[in-house]
Amino acid sequence: MKFITAIIKPFKFTEVKAALSDAGISGLTVSEVSGFGRQKGQTEVYRGAEYSSSMMPKLKLEIAVSDAFAETVVEILLKAASTGEIGDGKVFVFDLADVLRVRTGEQGDIAI
């Protein structure tokens, strides 16, 4: 099993969610986060005053999948979240030791 974490631009979420749904991925967790990478933020103008924002708003997606779906999910994320611009985000893939469904006690792939 794999645990995939993706950091994406917020406006790409609808496209990413639709692509994952079309591929049969039925569950994910979404969190609003902020951070910066190589771009080090951006400069904006508000009411005529210029200011620098080092923390960019992003969405963090967390998806647990069986090993068979991991590569497909990563490909979908890379394609659907890409704008070709700096700050598109990152995808992290971790080995997932175990999953347990709280309600039924099911364990492993069946609990995903």
Image (cartoon, rainbow, N blue to C red):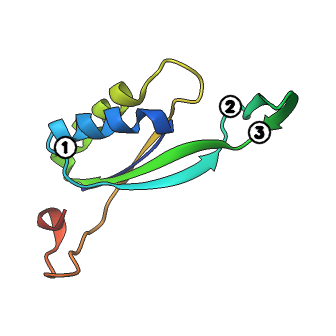
Tell us which disc is closer to us: 3 or 1: 3
Q: Position of residue 16 (x, y in %)?
A: 33, 36
The disc labelled 2 sits on which kind of residue? Arg
Q: Residue at x 34, y 28 (%)?
A: 80
* Residue 30, placed above or below residue 89: below
Q: Position of residue 6 (x, y in %)?
A: 43, 44
Q: Secondary structure at mark 1?
A: helix
Q: Are marks 3 and 1 in contact (CB under 8 Å)?
A: no
Q: Secondary structure at mark 2?
A: loop
Quadrant of residue 13 within the rendered picture? top left
Residue position for label 1: 69
Disc 1 crowd rating (10 Å Cα; few below 14, some 14-19, many 20+) is some
The alpha-carbon separation of the residues under discs 2 and 3 comes to: 14 Å
* Residue 77, placed above or below residue 7: above
Earlier in the chain: of badge 2 and badge 1, it is: 2
Q: Residue at x 82, y 32 (%)?
A: 47
Disc 2 crowd rating (10 Å Cα; few below 14, some 14-19, many 20+) is few
Q: Is residue 18 left or right of residue 81?
A: left
Residue position for label 2: 38
* Residue furthest top as drawn: 84
Earlier in the chain: of badge 2 and badge 3, it is: 2
Q: Is residue 101 left or right of residue 94?
A: left
* Residue 71, placed above or below residue 82: below
